[in-house]
Structures are given as structure tokens and as C-alpha cells.
Image (cartoon, coloured by chain):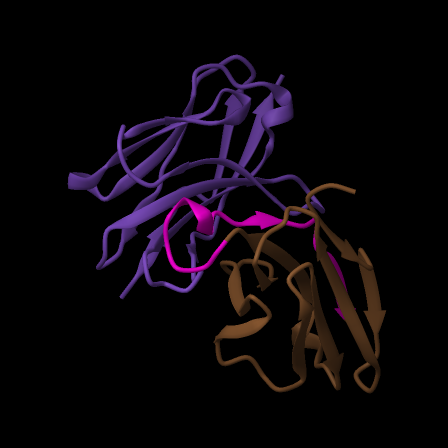
Chain colours: A brown, B purple
Amino acid sequence: ETGVTQTPRHLVMGMTNKKSLKCEQHLGHNAMYWYKQSAKKPLELMFVYSLEERVENNSVPSRFSPECPNSSHLFLHLHTLQPEDSALYLCASSQAVGGGPGETQYFGPGTRLLVL
Amino acid sequence: AQSVTQPDIHITVSEGASLELRCNYSYGATPYLFWYVQSPGQGLQLLLKYFSGDTLVQGIKGFEAEFKRSQSSFNLRKPSVHWSDAAEYFCAVGAVGSQGNLIFGKGTKLSVKP
């Protein structure tokens, strides 16, 4: 596999369910990101990890819990979500965080999440 | 406040016609700029980026963009549009020290008429 992969591609869950989104990057990068893309709204950065340490958390509700066990994998654990959390969740990776060309982000195909 | 504006929500052009998608930014620091494209149901694909140097940058698929600091703009252009270019285009801006926090515009949807 090349680039950034995400699984599952589609997910339907009830508000009481617990599920996890998985992201894997095959680019040898050290930074990974979670974004939320809702209709009619700009992309929202949720979390940034650099060398498995969280460096950015943009006031995301605690029902979203990220995990970065190594620089190639990133998870987003979901629990007791609300219908307004339905969106496309995009993962990205970059060589580094901190500015410069190394911060160019490469995106996965996304997970389309529907919360009922 | 930092922001990116893509004034055109939806643009329709004929196949073979030229294209210009507008992007204006407001950013306190020296910016670096990106254009991404998203096909339906897909993630974002990087078209091109500007960090420094030549203000006219070439990207993939025949796209180019010009950074104009005086106008705070980074418009995307293509001389001849193909039907496969129909997609949504996003401009994004970041800066040194932003910790990966890119600011994205709301996107411009491009439709191509045969």
C-alpha cells in the first residue's frame, strides 16, 4: 500500500456505540493529523501528533479520543457521539511539524461517518 | 484573525476553456500556501505548494498558481480544463510555528461543461 490509508471507509453507528477509526501512513512521516470535514464548513483540524506526542488539540469534545501508538498509525476512538458528529473524517501525515516544506500534508481517502 | 477566503462557491467552465480559482488569505506571519483537490467521496490530493522563491509555482495535472504578496492572493490557474478536472478545490495557508495548523478555505466546486 502507498500513501495514507484509512479504515473503514464508511461507518454507521448509534449514539451509544463505541467505534474506532484507523489511519496508516506508508510515507515514513513523523507527524499525523485528524480533520473533520462537514458539509458547508471548512476543514477543521482536530488533533496533531508529532513523534507520537500530541502537539495540538483544537478544543475537541472528549467523546473523540485519539491514539498514536507509533509514527505510522493513528486512531480516533469514538463514543457516545451525536448526530452532528456525522462527517467525513480525514487523516493526514507530514514529514514534520514546525514549518517549512516538510510540513506538507498528505491526506487519506477519509471515513464517512453517520451517527444515528 | 487568520483566514482564507475562496470567493467563488461554484464555478462552471466549458471543457477546453481556461480556469482561474481565487484564494485570498489573511495571516500575520509569512505564509506558506497550498492548493488541494478533492473528488467526490475522496480525500484531498495536493496540487501544488508555495514556500518561498519563485512566486509562480507549477503543480500536477497542468495547474499553476501565483503568489502575490501585495494582494494577499494565491490564485490557481489552468490554461485548458479537462472534464476530469471537475472536483472541489481547496486553498490552505500555514506558517512556521503553526504546529501543522493549516487554515483551509471553504472550497470552490468546479463543474465542467462538455
In the image, residue A49 sits, relative to residue B94, either above or below, namely below
User: x%, y% of residue B49?
Assistant: 41, 38
Q: Quadrant of residue B2?
A: bottom left
Q: Say whether residue B61 is left or right of residue A100.
A: right
The total number of labels drawn is: 0
Q: Quadrant of the N terminus of chain A?
A: top right
Q: Is residue A18 visible?
A: yes
Q: Say whether residue B76 is left or right of residue A27.
A: left
Q: Say whether residue B102 is left or right of residue A27.
A: left
Q: Is residue A116 visible?
A: no
User: x%, y% of residue B86?
Assistant: 60, 30
In the image, residue B16 sits, relative to residue A34, either above or below, namely above
Query: Residue at 70% of width from left, 81% of height from top?
Result: A82
User: x%, y% of residue B104?
Assistant: 44, 54
Would residue A14 be counted in the magenta stretch? Answer: no
Q: Nearer the viewer, residue A98 or B85?
A: A98
Q: Quadrant of residue B52?
A: top left
Would residue A99 be counted in the magenta stretch? Answer: yes
Q: Quadrant of the C terminus of chain A?
A: bottom right
Outermost residue toward the left in this view: B70
Query: Residue at 64% of width from left, 62% of height from top?
Result: A71
Q: Quadrant of residue A110?
A: bottom right
In the image, residue B31 sits, relative to residue A57, either above or below, namely above
Tell me where the magenta segment starts and ends, as one range. A96-114
Query: Residue at 68% of width from left, 75% of height from top?
Result: A67
In the image, residue B51 sits, relative to residue B54, either above or below, namely below
